[in-house]
Image: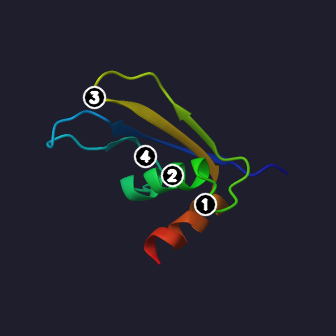
Amino acid sequence: MKSNLLHARFWKYTGESPEGQDHIRYDPHGFGLVLISAMAYHAENKIIPLDGVVINHHKGDQFGHQVHVTATQEQWDAVKKIVRG
């Protein structure tokens, strides 16, 4: 039986303004920006084994782009332990 995948999205700011910042775009499970961005970071950099996590970077503009993160509840929980200690 395949686990359900949970989706979340955030805006990754890459502009040059000191006022710019990342922010949540879609978070139906209440993960929060820190956890969503940490999941993307850990999965992309293979810091911990996160097989099957999908990270999609959507085309953006000069200010940034949207990052879509998809993982199982167990994977979200594993990264949550790292982020929150």
Name the N-terminal-most of marks 3 and 4: 4
| Three-letter residue code for mark 2 | Tyr
Residue 47: mark in rendering = 1
Q: Amino acid at mark 4?
A: Asp
Residues at discs 3 and 4 in contact (Cβ within 8 Å): no
Going from the N terminus, do you reach mark 3 or mark 2 first? 2
Where does the image place residue 31, in percent across and percent down from the top left? 45, 56
Between marks 3 and 2, how big is the CA–CA gap? 19 Å
Q: In 3D space, how far apart are the residues under numbered discs 1 and 2 (Cα atoms)?
A: 8 Å
Mark number for residue 27?
4
Nearest the camera: 26 or 68?
68
Name which residue lies at 68% across and 55% down. 50
Of badges 4 and 2, nearer the viewer stands 2
Q: Position of residue 1 (x, y in %)?
A: 85, 51
| Residue at the image point whose x is 64% and y is 55% from the top | 46
The reply to whether discs 3 and 2 touch (Cβ–Cβ < 8 Å) is: no
The circle on residue 14 is none
